[in-house]
């Protein structure tokens, strides 16, 4: 029973598992012998052996009557691994293609259209910083980050590599200190507005990611320190 369950874990069904285990014991045999030894109906044994051959677990001998020989488990495993890797790569390629089509046809039209405003609620400090890092990565012109002294220090540390990267390509980054205001404005249109004061637990922190040139201009003009 233990051997049968192990064979099934290789992706073989009940009859295939029985036939392969039987072939390992016999070494080579005709279909009728496998049918009797593995308790597989004669009407099914040829289909089962053909399936095992396609999967790389047995090989057909050029003889009459037709006989089969077992493939060593290690060799069969290598063949199975290659087949599954190819299947996985094909499947991942299909997923990537679908994602690309959806992004081109839907995502950019809905959220990236020029002049179209939108707002997204972001929860948790780690997610908020991830969104801010994404805004900085895609920035083309400037970024203004307004926060308390503690908040500025934290953001400089958490986003140090991203800040250095955009600085090298000419994006201007300014930090403004404020005890009351907490926001980031990128390229004068993308706003990340923190909804809580300092001191709240990281997981409870929330922010709004807003695409609004009007709000961006308002925040920049009212926080010029």
Image (cartoon, helix red, strand yellow):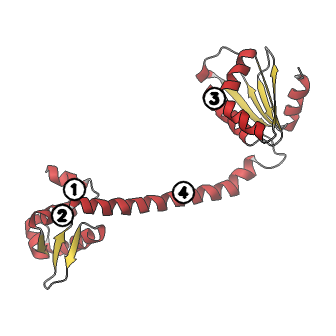
- Indicate the quadrant where residue 125 lies: top right
Where residue 20 is drawn, which disc sits there?
2
Label 3's element? Answer: strand
Going from the N terminus, do you reach mark 2 or mark 1 first? 1
Which of discs 1 and 3 lies nearer the camera? The answer is 1
Rounded to the nearest angstrom, the CA distance separating label 1 from label 3 is 47 Å
Going from the N terminus, do you reach mark 4 or mark 1 first? 1
| Residue drawn 68% across the image and 30% down it | 159
Label 2's element? Answer: helix
Rounded to the nearest angstrom, the CA distance separating label 2 from label 1 is 8 Å
Vertical position of residue 163 compared to residue 107: above or below: above
Q: Label 3: which residue?
A: 123
Bin the neighbour count of mark 4 within 10 Å (Cα to Cα): few under 14, some 14-19, many 20 and up: few
Side of 89 where 157 appears, left or right: right
What is the quadrant of the C terminus in the image?
A: top right
Residue 173 percent location from the top left of the image: 80, 31
Rounded to the nearest angstrom, the CA distance separating label 2 from label 3 is 54 Å
Residue 45 percent location from the top left of the image: 18, 72
Rounded to the nearest angstrom, the CA distance separating label 4 from label 1 is 30 Å
Side of 22 where 146 appears, left or right: right
Rounded to the nearest angstrom, the CA distance separating label 4 from label 3 is 28 Å
Going from the N terminus, do you reach mark 2 or mark 3 first? 2
| Residue drawn 70% across the image and 28% down it | 207
Furthest-right residue in view? 221
Q: Label 4: which residue?
A: 95
Label 4's element? Answer: helix
């Amino acid at each position: 029973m233990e051997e049968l369950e192990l064979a099934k874990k290789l992706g073989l069904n009940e009859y295939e598992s029985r036939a392969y285990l039987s072939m390992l014991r016999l070494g080579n045999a005709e279909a009728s012998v496998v049918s009797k030894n593995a308790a597989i109906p004669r009407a099914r044994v040829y289909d089962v052996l053909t399936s095992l051959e396609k999967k790389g677990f047995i090989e057909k001998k050029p003889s009459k009557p037709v006989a089969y020989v077992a493939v060593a488990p290690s060799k069969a495993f290598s063949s199975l691994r290659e087949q599954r890797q190819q299947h996985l790569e094909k499947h991942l390629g299909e997923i990537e293609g679908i994602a690309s089509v959806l992004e081109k046809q839907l995502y950019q039209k809905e959220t990236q259209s020029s002049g179209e405003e939108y707002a997204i609620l972001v929860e948790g400090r780690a997610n908020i910083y991830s969104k801010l890092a994404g805004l900085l990565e895609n920035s083309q012109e400037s970024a203004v980050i307004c926060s308390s002294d503690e908040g500025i220090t934290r953001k400089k540390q958490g986003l140090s590599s991203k800040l250095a990267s955009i600085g090298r390509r000419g994006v201007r980054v300014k930090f403004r200190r404020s005890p009351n205001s907490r926001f980031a404005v990128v390229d004068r249109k993308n706003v990340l507005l923190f909804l809580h004061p300092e001191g709240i637990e990281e997981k409870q922190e929330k922010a709004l990611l807003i695409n609004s040139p009007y709000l961006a201009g308002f925040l920049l003009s009212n926080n010029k320190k």
